[in-house]
Image: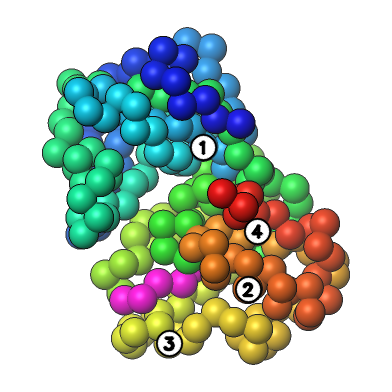
Amino acid sequence: MPDSATENKARVRIFEKIEVSHDVNRWVVEKPEGFDYEPGQAVELCLDKDGYRDEPRPFTMTSRPSDPTLEFVIKTYEQRDGVTDELDEFKAGEHLRIGEPFGAISYRGEGTFIAGGAGVTPFIAIFRELFAKGEVGLNRLIFSNSKAQDVFMKAEFDRLLGDRVIYTLTDEDAPWAERRKVDKAFLGERCSAFGEQHFYLCGPPGMGKQLKADLIDLGADEDKIVHEDWSG
């Protein structure tokens, strides 16, 4: 479990901030000595700034464990006037504090990854690791967003997965996406062999809980549905 105490968090320097989309940034930061994790895991991160050192938030590493630095891909929620909004003002040379890695999402075997919005971030490191090892296999991604501008890192997902990525939009049309809600009907049409594959879910808790129930109704093995703890 994460530990929110500031004194138990490593102080790391921001090396680079890169704009990924209108509300998503890629952060490259210092990697603490001996820091190890599984692709898909997260850390509690807080800003090394008065008023924010005791305001940790969970963020997923999108870098591979063998990389010399850590990477986070983080969406800014300006309307919430919170940690991500304040983080957006940080620059290279400033510092963050990170805790120990934790999280239930890790690669268990081939299957279908279903992400809503920023929920795709735990899957980035997993796909990068599989691609580097030549083990992408039959894995695929269903990535759902509201509008086309909300879809980030599309070029990389296309490179890593080819035609094994499906984009859906709920609020508008795009030539490369289906205008559909990811629900039981959609899954019944686009997936098969429910009991034989793994399903990985990450996104808003309400979406995840409903999709888990839908998948089980469609024949998925509950023990093969991988997701974070939604009880918090």
Q: Say which quarter of the image contains residue 178.
A: bottom left
Q: CA–CA distance between discs 1 and 2?
A: 23 Å
- Left or right: residue 15 versus residue 164 is left
Q: Which residue is mark 3?
A: 179
User: Looking at the picture, how far across and down is residue 64, in whole percent?
Assistant: 51, 34
> Split into 4 quadrants, where in the image is the N terminus?
top right
Disc 1 element: strand
Disc 4 element: strand
Q: Which residue is mark 2?
A: 210
Give the magenta range.
141-147
Is residue 178 in view? Answer: yes
Q: Residues within 10 Å of mark 2 (few under 14, many from 20)?
A: few
Q: Amino acid at mark 4?
A: Tyr
Q: Which residue is mark 1?
A: 42
Q: Are marks 1 and 2 in contact (CB under 8 Å)?
A: no
Check the image and report above or below for 22 versus 15. below
Q: Amino acid at mark 2?
A: Gln
Q: Amino acid at mark 3?
A: Arg
Q: CA–CA distance between discs 1 and 3?
A: 31 Å
Picture disc at residue 133:
none
Q: CA–CA distance between discs 3 and 2?
A: 19 Å
Going from N to C along the chain, the mark reached first, 1 or 2, is 1
Disc 2 element: helix
Going from N to C along the chain, the mark reached first, 2 or 4, is 4
* Number of numbered labels in the structure image: 4
User: Looking at the picture, how far across and down is residue 113, in whole percent?
Assistant: 61, 62
Q: Which residue is mark 4?
A: 200
| Front-most of residues 198 and 225 | 225
Of helix, strand and loop, which mostly describes the magenta segment? strand
Check the image and report above or below for 226 versus 176. above
